[in-house]
Structures are given as C-alpha cells and as structure tokens.
Amino acid sequence: MNNQVVSEYNEYLKLTDGDKAAAASLTLAAVMLEGRSEAPVQPAMALTVAEAARRLRVSRCTVYQMCQSGRLRSFRPGTGRALRIPVEAVEQCENKSGVREPTRRFPDIIKRYC
C-alpha cells in the first residue's frame, strides 16, 4: 500500500477513535477525490430559458423545442427542474442563424436632411 494512504488511514483512525471501518471509508473517499475539484463542473455562464429566448429573439416555447431537438445545448443544474443554457451554445446558435444586435438607425426625418 502507498505510504501516503497508510498515513491518511492512521490519521482518520485517530479522528474516529479507532473505528476501522469509518477510517477506511474516509481514506477511500479521500483517495477517490484526490485531484478532483469538489464541486461538479458546470459551464461558467449559463442563461435561463427566458434570457436565451430574449437573446435569440424567439419565444420560450421555441427555446424548449430547440433544446429538446438538440439544436440548442442545455442542462439541468443539481436536482431541480430548471433548465439552463450555456452562453456558448446561445452564441453558436446566434452565429448559425445570423441573429445579431439590431443596428441603430437614424429616424427617417434625419435621413431626409443628410
């Protein structure tokens, strides 16, 4: 056995007042989690369905349909029912569909005099 694992086991054995099963369980958990981040990895920025719909200029129903068909990547954080859409997925969809921010135009009255 690895010396580090043995030392961790002995440390947990002291902390659990000699309970070998508990110390072994804690050691196993520590070894399994070694090198992993504690929180599950989720996309850095995610939008709600309403936010994604606003950016794509479609209805919420359309966003749900796009997610269900696979045209728009989505996930459900934790155990909740809420649906989240990664910003990158919305940007990819914007690029494919040509959706851009509207350019501001001069009112028609100004155009006449320019």
Image: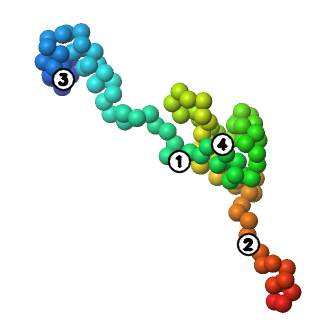
Q: Secondary structure at mark 4?
A: helix
Residue 33 showing in the rendered view: yes
Do the CB atoms of the residues marked 3 and 4 lie less than 8 Å apart? no
- Residue picked out by circle 3: 8
- Residue picked out by circle 4: 49
Horizontal and vertical percent for residue 14? 13, 18
Quadrant for the C terminus, please. bottom right
Sequence-wise first label, 1 or 3: 3
Crowd class of label 1 (few under 14; some 14 to 19; many from 20; radius 10 Å): few
- Residue picked out by circle 2: 104
Q: Secondary structure at mark 1?
A: loop
Image quarter for residue 59? top right
Specify the amino acid type for callout 4.
Answer: Val
Q: CA distance from mark 4 to mark 1?
A: 13 Å
- Residue picked out by circle 1: 45
Specify the amino acid type for callout 3.
Answer: Glu
Crowd class of label 2 (few under 14; some 14 to 19; many from 20; radius 10 Å): few
7 in relation to 73, above or below: above
Specify the amino acid type for callout 1.
Answer: Met
Q: CA distance from mark 3 to mark 2?
A: 64 Å
